[in-house]
Image: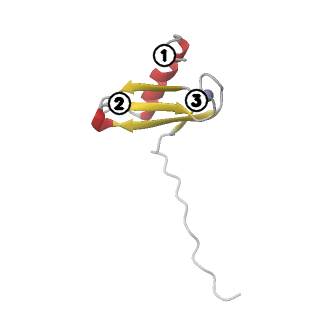
């Protein structure tokens, strides 16, 4: 009833990179990358199996780069 309300416009921003990645250990989409560029490191954590790593970052690093290194380390068996 009444006038139509203005609908919320949901924009899909394609520039946004994914922030949640697939865990190399448990296969769940539950790996988060917390960047701390100020401290020069990032923390990567899987909320399902608890796989965690701390990696050095450069100011130009993207979360996806950190994730790539994280999975490389895992496959090189350098992570728990
Ligand atoms: Zn996991």
Query: Of callouts 1 and 3, which one flags the residue occurring earlier in the amino acid sequence?
Result: 3
Residue topped by disc 1: 73
- Closer to the camera in the image, 5 or 32: 32
Residue topped by disc 2: 41
How far apart are the two marked residues, 1 and 2, measured between alpha carbons? 15 Å
Q: Nearer the viewer, mark 1 or mark 3?
A: 3
- Closer to the camera in the image, 32 or 61: 32
Residue topped by disc 3: 50
Residue reaching furthest top?
76
Q: Is residue 47 above or below residue 9?
A: above
Residue 56 placement, left or right of 10: left
What residue is shown at x 48% (from left), y 31% (from top)?
44
| Number of residues whose C-alpha sits closer than 10 Å to that of mark 1, classed few (under 14), some (14–19) or many (20 or more) | some
Is label 2 within 8 A of ligand 1 (CB to nearest ligand atom)? no
Is label 3 within 8 A of ligand 1 (CB to nearest ligand atom)? yes
Quarter of the render that holds ligand 1: top right
| Number of residues whose C-alpha sits closer than 10 Å to that of mark 3, classed few (under 14), some (14–19) or many (20 or more) | some
SS at circle 1: helix
Snapshot quadrant of residue 9: bottom right
């Amino acid at each position: 009833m009444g006038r139509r309300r203005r609908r919320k416009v949901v924009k899909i921003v394609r520039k946004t990179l994914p922030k949640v990645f697939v865990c190399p250990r448990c296969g769940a989409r539950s790996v988060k990358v917390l960047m701390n560029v100020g401290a020069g490191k990032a923390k990567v954590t899987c909320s399902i199996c608890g796989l965690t790593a701390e990696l050095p970052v450069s100011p130009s690093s993207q979360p996806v780069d950190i994730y790539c290194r994280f999975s490389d380390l895992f496959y090189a068996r350098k992570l728990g």
